[in-house]
Image (cartoon, helix red, strand yellow):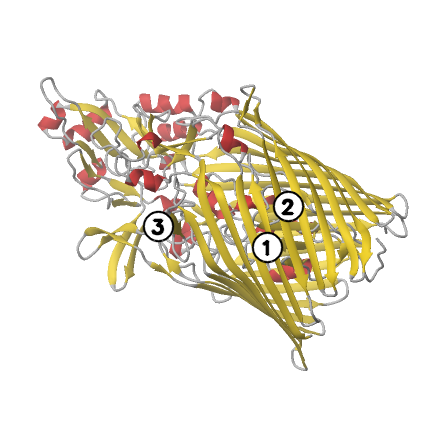
Amino acid sequence: SQATAETQRVEITGSSIKRIAAEGALPVQVITAEQIKASGSTNVAEFIQRLPAMQGFQIADIAIGTNSGGIATANIHDIGSSYTLVLLNGRRIAPTGSGSTINLQGIPMSAIERIEVLTDGASALYGSDAIAGVVNFVLKNSHKGGQLNVQADKPLEGGGQSSNISLTYGFGNLDTDRFSLVATYRHDQQAALKSGDREFADSAYVPFTYNGTKYIYDRTSTFAIPANATVVFKKLPGETTALPSYSFNPYQKANGSCAVNNYYSLNNAVTATSVTENCAFDFVSTIDIYPESKRDSLFLAGQLKLSDSVRLFSDVAYTKFDLIARIAPNPVPISIATTSDLYTKYIVPNLTADQLAHVGTVSASYRASDFGTRDSQTITDAKHIVVGADADIGAWNINSALTWSQNATDERYVGGYFKDTEFRALIASGALDPFAVAGQQSASTQTAINNSIFNGSIRTSQTTLAAADVRASGEIFRLASGAVSLGLGADFRRLSFEQNPSDLAKAGAIYNYAAVPAYDLSRDSSGAFAELLVPVMKGLEVTGALRFDSIGAVKDGVNNKSVGSSESAVTYKLSGRFQPNKEWLFRGSYGTGFKAPAMLDIAQPLVASGVTASSYDCPFPGTEACKPGKLQYSVLAGGNDQLKPEESTQATLGLRFEPVDYFGIGLDYWEVKIKDAVSGVSEKQAFADPVKYADLFTLYRTPAETQDYWAFKRVSTNIGKTINKGIDWDVTMRGQSDLLGKVTFNLAGTHMLEASYTRPGTDNDFTDSMNRYGENAAVTFRNVFRGTIRSDINQWSHSLTFKYRNGYKDVSTTVRDVATNKLVSLSVDVSDYTTFDWQTTYRATSALELRLGINNLLNEAPPFTLRDSSGHQVGYDARYADPKLRTVYMAASYKF
């Protein structure tokens, strides 16, 4: 390349051809480090997830109750996090798990120079996983001197404070010294936010008024403290029917009301097979709603100029993310012997003579409050190393690198879980009274409780990516309208996923815990692409890209076999830009894409995977595997070795209009259609029609259960289709005034036109989640936008940012009508959510910069919702609103 300081040729995300940076044929949003600082964001995920084009991402908050470890993801246009490819300096990084989803918690924020977001599919260049688009974090590779940054954030409503400090130092100049080295380190600290710190999130028993009628929403749990008792009756000789099972709360029977932090369950009912008179525990009152975490990240970038045309480079990134999620005390099923004192004291007085004559089994549904909250710690180590060379040979630039990247986790229980032997001994001795009020165990029993707490690792896992790539781009000949450029490339990747239960977990040392299976899965893939840019005439250029990928079968190292089959795919992309004059730019693209299934989607055996998100009546009433009343059932998850890659088509059509240098507007229409999407019948579908989906139910018992109960099997298949369409838009205005100085206004948003998908298990029965809580337990918002007005005058900068997300129709759920005392089905209207952020920056000297800001300036609370998934929070949806409320932050930066 014949680059100069003024016309440096760079590679922009979405193209392999290095060229002078300018508005191209593809919609790429470029975000600078200054824009990130001006947002007041405390981490990478928080910033990315605030972009209007992002919807449907996973957030760290839902680690409270989902065992996610605090994973936070990017998701362009709500197509799916696994369809958004995340790159570090243009190269892949190791995902989380066995698929392609990247955890943004591992990105070193202090090292970011800019972020490039391509909101168009790019499988023809990058291969699998880029159907929705690409997020490329471009990190610093040159820096002179040092820079110290500190920031502290404090929510004014209490709880959830955070802070960070970073140090960056660089020396060497590639042109004069023939080398450069940059190092940056950052430490983040985030305190937990407890449910009791926020009125809108402090209970699972929620009275509310809707359209003038008073209701009660009840998400409380029948694993209570003091415990509920369940008696199952047996048939005596000669009898053909059994008495209905009976569930009740001995404390409530003795005292006339439930204990503190418990409510008389709204799910209580009398049926032909069961009678329930339970108290229900308010588990939400005990949880964190925003997890505690700390992060340490280090990034090193080095360059060595061997000659004027050859450069060596290396990137090393390391992040350790340590998160603790606290959820309600353990719900424990305890068998009560009919010969025990507990039976005599609590059960016998509450049964009739006829019931006493038919007693079969007795159990307690106990909430182990005296053992403390269940605290899980997930330590994630993200390591990333790239070594490569960049050379200019004639008119060609050649770039090649080796990449080794790993994402490793260690999941630990650090509170509220039990050692199996010690806990069973405690139960067998009769010392633990599950029917006692919390805090009233004897001193000796409390000592035994403290000694029974398990503290240690339950599993480790690691995903490792080893890759090699080579890319070349250059001008091959010239036309009257300009140079024809060609980009070529090839890459090889090996993705490995290992998981190992801890020795103690395998030995059954943890009460009622089924150890995760061991995995040793790997898969090789390779690909090659070509990209041709042709300037057809002045102002008009067309680009075509073609890629071939080969994906191998999954190698199962534990069972020493291959699972699934090898697959190959050819994808292409055509794009063009037409700029008839300096005011107008038109652009468009059309292409195809594909996504390989995650290795576990193919090779996972049927394993325990938690419990259903909601409580259900028994799917097959009258069978011995029924639970009494409406309760949660176990979920088993498994793979499908017949899965094949998902296929897609993508298209964009856009324009930019800048009639004057102080005003510009842009519109980009986009659509993505996916077929053979990996789909599966949802739990709500299955429990709504268990006869139709009878093959998705099986018998299963947890380690602590004394009998088999029905369990739901969640298995995936290639049957689904999705259609997503929308318009990304932005408006920018600039001006100058004596009072405010340089004023910039930017407004950008996404308007969704369609977000439909086939119902799980079907290929032609479409539904959607547009502005409503859909069957996928999520919402697609029609309109999301943000605007910023900024004033720069002398040493001061002031900015006001507002963010908007429209309201939607909530999930239909069962609530109690207070006036009639009857259960009714209700779907509330969830309100719009608008917040304002303010920031002032003062540049005291060329070295010292101070910032003061307030996020959520008007203290807007999250909208009220009755959603029943994605974490243990109740009353609001943590995915769509920030529970921290008004937060003041101060930041300082000093260069030396």
Q: Residues within 10 Å of mark 2 (few under 14, many from 20)?
A: many
Q: Residues within 10 Å of mark 1 (few under 14, many from 20)?
A: many
Q: Position of residue 438 (x, y in %)?
A: 32, 38
Would residue 287 be visible to someone looking at this image? yes
In the depicted structure, whether residue 513 falls above or below residue 729: above
Q: Give the residue displayed 36% in from the left and 31% down from the top.
A: 443
Callout 3 secondary element: loop
- Residues 464 and 742: in front is 464
Q: CA distance from mark 3 to mark 1?
A: 39 Å
Callout 1 secondary element: loop
Asked whether the beta carbons under mark 2 and mark 1 sit within 8 Å of each other, the answer is: no
Is the C terminus in the top left, top right, bottom left or bottom right quadrant?
A: bottom right
Q: Is residue 212 left or right of residue 138?
A: left
Callout 2 secondary element: helix
Q: Give the residue displayed 43% in from the left and 61% down from the top.
A: 861
Residue situated furthest bottom in the rendering: 738
Task: Tell me the mark number nearer the camera, choosing from 3 and 1.
Answer: 1
At label 1, the amino acid type is Thr
Q: Residues within 10 Å of mark 3 (few under 14, many from 20)?
A: many
Q: CA distance from mark 3 to mark 2?
A: 49 Å
Residue designated by label 3: 203
Q: Which mark is residue 119?
A: 1
At label 2, the amino acid type is Ala
Residue designated by label 2: 124
